[in-house]
């Protein structure tokens, strides 16, 4: 099986033409939603970390 770079590039071009590309509006909307979800998840984990940290501090400060 030989590698034919010209045929490969031609096939890539044909396949890229078949792709349904998102519109600019769809891209901006999904990017915004990803950023919102990342901020919400970061806030959630910050809150969980603070609660766990408070619990550990409480356990070790009263034990001494």
Image (spheres, rainbow, N blue to C red):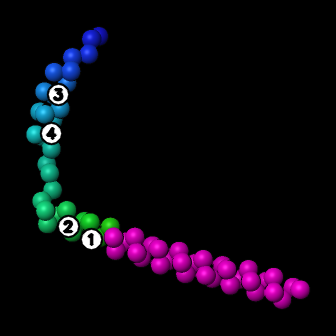
Say what secondary structure mark 2 lies in: helix
- Residue under the point 25% across and 65% down: 30
Q: Residues within 10 Å of mark 4 (few under 14, many from 20)?
A: few
Q: Residue beneath label 2, please? A: 28
Q: Label 1 near label 2: C-beta < 8 Å?
A: yes
Q: Residues within 10 Å of mark 1 (few under 14, many from 20)?
A: few
- Give residue 29's position: percent from left, percent from top: 21, 69
> Which x, y percent locates residue 40?
42, 76
Q: Is residue 60 within the magenta segment?
A: yes
| Part of the protein shown in magenta | 35-64
Report, in whole angstroms, how far the alpha carbon at label 1 lies from the one at label 3: 34 Å
Whichever of labels 2 and 4 marks the residue nearer the N terminus, that label is 4
Q: Which residue is mark 1?
A: 32
Q: Which residue is mark 4?
A: 16
C-alpha distance separating marks 2 and 4: 21 Å
Whether residue 25 appears in magenta in the rendering, the answer is no
């Amino acid at each position: 099986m030989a590698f034919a770079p010209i045929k490969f590039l031609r096939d890539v071009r044909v396949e890229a033409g078949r792709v349904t590309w998102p519109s600019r509006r769809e891209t901006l909307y999904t990017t915004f939603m990803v950023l919102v979800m990342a901020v919400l998840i970061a806030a959630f984990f910050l809150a969980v970390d603070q609660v766990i940290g408070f619990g550990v501090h409480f356990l070790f400060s009263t034990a001494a």
